[in-house]
Amino acid sequence: MPEGAARAYLRDPPDAELHLLDGGHWALETDLDEIVALVRAFLSRLAPGSASGR
């Protein structure tokens, strides 16, 4: 998704975050550790206890 289109999503949910990675269509294959860390950090701030890895 182009950066401009991604930034449009920041207008809607108040707790949204945007992290731009150069992963292309295979982001989970190339940047999995970084993506997992970002998602876990976000979930721990939004709903403490939800990102425990269980």
Image: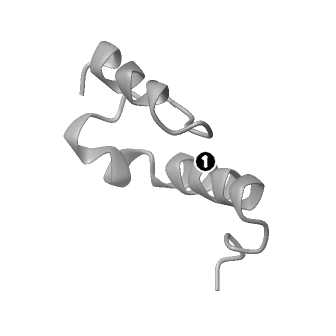
Q: Is residue 11 above or below residue 46?
A: above
Q: Residue at x 65, y 59 (%)?
A: 43
Q: Among all residues in the image, which is located at the extreme top? A: 4
- Name the quadrant of the N terminus: top left
Q: Which residue is mark 1?
A: 38
Type of amino acid under label 1: Leu
Q: Is residue 28 above or below residue 12?
A: below
Q: Secondary structure at mark 1?
A: helix
- Name the quadrant of the C terminus: bottom right
Q: Is residue 49 left or right of residue 22?
A: right
Q: Is residue 51 left or right of residue 10?
A: right
Give the percent coordinates (x, y) of residue 18: 51, 30
Q: Residue at x 28, y 20 (%)?
A: 5
Quadrant in the rendering for residue 33: bottom right
Between 26 and 16, which is closer to the camera in this rendering?
Answer: 16
Question: Could one spot residue 52 in this view of the protein?
Answer: yes
Q: Is residue 53 above or below residue 34?
A: below
